[in-house]
């Protein structure tokens, strides 16, 4: 695992380093944590927030900010840990994760969690929402704002994603970026790999080691003029501990 130091794309944001994320995640206890689903996203989320996304607690409502949509919303411990490390939410909220009175639910709620752009729930909705967000930003003239959406490989079994992929490529949505966490959870799979499905629809597509921070950063920043971009981040296969096979 190649680690990066805190050097935020969001200047002035209070930040803990990558090494603190394990401690922050350990503060969140309780049942139904979906731990493997959370840890599969940890490195990819960190590099995105630390080095790529142009958004901070101070600019979380700015019209021209970058947008990050978490479609893979179950098991959001890594997401909450990164938000705490970047100063969007106070660390003191983490021990209450999943509690009745806590804003940090088992799926993020955009009304309750600062920095969350969408409320997640049923799989397969994040990519279509990201397509609509990219279209809306373009219509409003925010041509420098980028949209990122993190989805799980099992979400690609959902038909709504097929339609979003098929539309976004020919539409030339350069602002749209998808990050697919591939932990071998998908039921159907893809001939030639996940990236091939996006490439066939006109996307720019890169597959990388989802634990290698420099490889992730290079993939995130690959130029893709006139096309949406997808990064497929391969991580270790999700262990089978009786949890439902969800992304």
Image: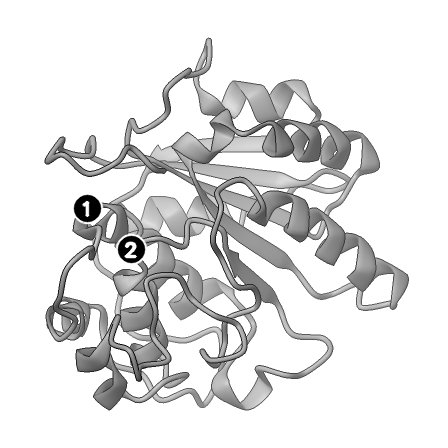
- Residue ID at (48%, 73%): 9
Q: Are marks 2 and 1 in contact (CB under 8 Å)?
A: yes
Alpha carbon separation for disc pair 2 and 1? 8 Å
Q: Which disc is residue 214 wearing?
A: none
Q: Residue 6, how many percent across, how many down? A: 30, 75
- Residue ID at (34%, 69%): 105
- Identify which residue, 223 or 168, lies in the foreground: 168
**Which callout, 2 or 1, points at the residue further toward the start of the chain?**
1
Mark 1 secondary-structure assignment: helix
Q: Which disc is residue 36 wearing?
A: 1
Mark 2 secondary-structure assignment: loop
* Quarter where residue 167 is shown: top right
Identify residue for label 2.
75
Q: In the shown orientation, is residue 68 left or right of residue 235?
A: right
- Identify which residue, 219 or 139, lies in the foreground: 139
- Residue ID at (24%, 76%): 99
Identify whether 241 is placed above or below 148.
above
* Quarter where residue 49 is shown: bottom left
Q: Quadrant of the C terminus?
A: top left
* Quarter where residue 188 is shown: top left
How many callouts does the rendering have? 2
Identify whether 211 is placed above or below 157.
below
- Identify which residue, 68 or 75, lies in the foreground: 75
Residue 25 visible somewhere in the drawing: yes
Q: Residue 54, how many percent across, how many down? A: 56, 72
- Identify which residue, 238 or 65, lies in the foreground: 238
Q: Residue 244, how many percent across, how many down? A: 26, 36
Q: Residues within 10 Å of mark 1 (few under 14, many from 20)?
A: some
């Amino acid at each position: 695992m190649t680690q990066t130091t805190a050097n935020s794309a969001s200047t002035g944001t209070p930040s803990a380093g990558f090494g603190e994320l394990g401690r922050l995640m350990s503060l969140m206890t309780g049942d139904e944590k979906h731990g493997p689903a959370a840890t599969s996203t940890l490195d990819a989320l960190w590099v995105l927030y630390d080095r790529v996304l142009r958004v901070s607690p101070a600019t979380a409502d700015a019209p021209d900010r970058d947008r990050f949509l978490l479609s893979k919303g179950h098991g959001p411990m890594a997401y909450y840990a990164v938000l705490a490390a970047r100063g969007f939410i106070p660390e003191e909220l983490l021990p209450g994760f999943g509690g009745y009175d806590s804003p940090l639910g088992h799926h993020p709620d955009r009304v309750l969690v600062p920095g969350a752009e969408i409320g997640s729930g049923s799989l397969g909705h994040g990519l279509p929402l990201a397509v609509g967000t990219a279209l809306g930003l373009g219509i409003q003239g925010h041509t420098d704002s980028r949209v990122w959406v993190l989805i799980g490989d099992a979400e690609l079994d959902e038909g709504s994603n097929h339609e979003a992929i098929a539309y976004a490529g020919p539409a030339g949505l350069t602002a749209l970026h998808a990050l697919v966490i591939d932990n071998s959870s998908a039921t159907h799979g893809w001939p030639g790999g996940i990236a091939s499905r996006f490439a066939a629809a006109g996307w720019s597509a890169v597959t990388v080691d989802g634990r290698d921070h420099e490889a992730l950063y290079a993939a995130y920043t690959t130029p893709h003029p006139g096309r949406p971009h997808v990064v497929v981040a391969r991580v270790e296969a999700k262990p089978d501990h009786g949890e439902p096979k969800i992304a």
